[in-house]
Amino acid sequence: MPRLLGVLESQKQLGGASYPPTLDRLAELTGDTPAVILKALSARDAEGRVLLSRAAGGKKKPGPATTLVLLADDLEAVAQSDRLLELQLQSARTPDAPAVDLAQLPKGLLPALGRAFEAALEQRIAERRLPRTVGAVTGKKPLFFFLADAVLPAAATPALPAAATSASAPDAAPRLTASNGAHPAASAGAGKAPTDALREAPSNGAPAAPFAARFDAAFTALDRDAGGLNYVTLRALRAALPDVPRAAFDAELAALRRQRRYSLDPSDGRHHQMADAEREAGILEAGNLLVYVARRHDA
């Protein structure tokens, strides 16, 4: 249990899509199997400290890829999170029925979490507040759907969350895709190279702009080209600032993370096979290869 709690706390510190992890992801981080994790979580010392988003009792075991593992104190926060909404919608939708009734979304969740989640959904509808990837039709029986499943003007069609496609050129960021209804992770770039001002330091002898300002500008430009989904690859950002040595880049980015301006997320590996260049651009931290950058709004 101490090791599991330590991993959960570290993932919580990373923020974004890192927490809460799925049962699959937690097993990967600890080097165990989902069955071993479930056994540990059924022990008495785990009671009241760690929760599964889906009930683990009876013959039907929770699906490792669709079950979140969270600290008990975070139940309300997770119920209100974009991550749980996207995961439940992805689990409930089908190609023939991509829109899901609000009442269907909490199904399968731990009762306490399901009640809090349903209340959060009703509040989202009232406040017209949803993730960038999700839309809803209001009414007596609200329906939720991924925007990638809707018929929209081509230029406005966004990608589903959580995977990415490989870029074909070394300096290009991966393109977004949502062709099969699986979660593609938002990544930066849509085939456009960053502007020259972002790619190069001044050549006229003038001092370069501070790293934070250049990084902010690069992230904004790349994220805008990707559809404004707030996910940009480290590979694309390194390519946008080629004059910054890797060690200096990593140190400056660490400072921005300490200031809670950005978070780093891993690839879950299920929907996107990372290219070697993406892996090489990543940052290995606590056994976790972090490859995506997201701007935080909770500073």
Image: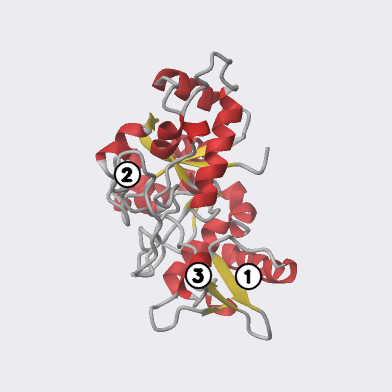
The residue where tag 1 is placed is 118
Quarter-of-image position of residue 177: bottom left
Q: How far apart are the two marked residues, 3 and 1, measured between alpha carbons?
A: 18 Å
Q: Residue at x 68, y 84 (%)?
A: 139
User: Around disc 2, counting alpha carbons within 10 Å, would you say few (fewer than 14), some (14 to 19), or many (20 or more)?
Assistant: some
Depth check, front residue: 105 or 164: 164
In terms of sequence position, does the residue under pointer 2 or pointer 1 come before the other? 2
Most distant residue in the top direction: 205
Identify which amino acid the numbered label 2 is placed on.
Glu
Residue 183 at what x, y percent from top left? 40, 61
Whether tag 3 and tag 2 are in contact, CB under 8 A, the answer is: no
Q: How far apart are the two marked residues, 2 and 1, measured between alpha carbons?
A: 30 Å
Q: Looking at the rendered structure, which numbered label has been put on residue 146?
A: 3
Identify which amino acid the numbered label 3 is placed on.
Phe
Residue 230 seen by the camera:
no
Q: Looking at the rendered structure, which numbered label has been put on residue 28?
A: 2
Q: Residue at x 37, y 46 (%)?
A: 267
Secondary element type, mark 3: strand
In terms of sequence position, does the residue under pointer 3 or pointer 2 come before the other? 2
Secondary element type, mark 1: helix
Residue 113 against residue 18 in the figure, above or below: below
Quadrant the C terminus occupies = top right
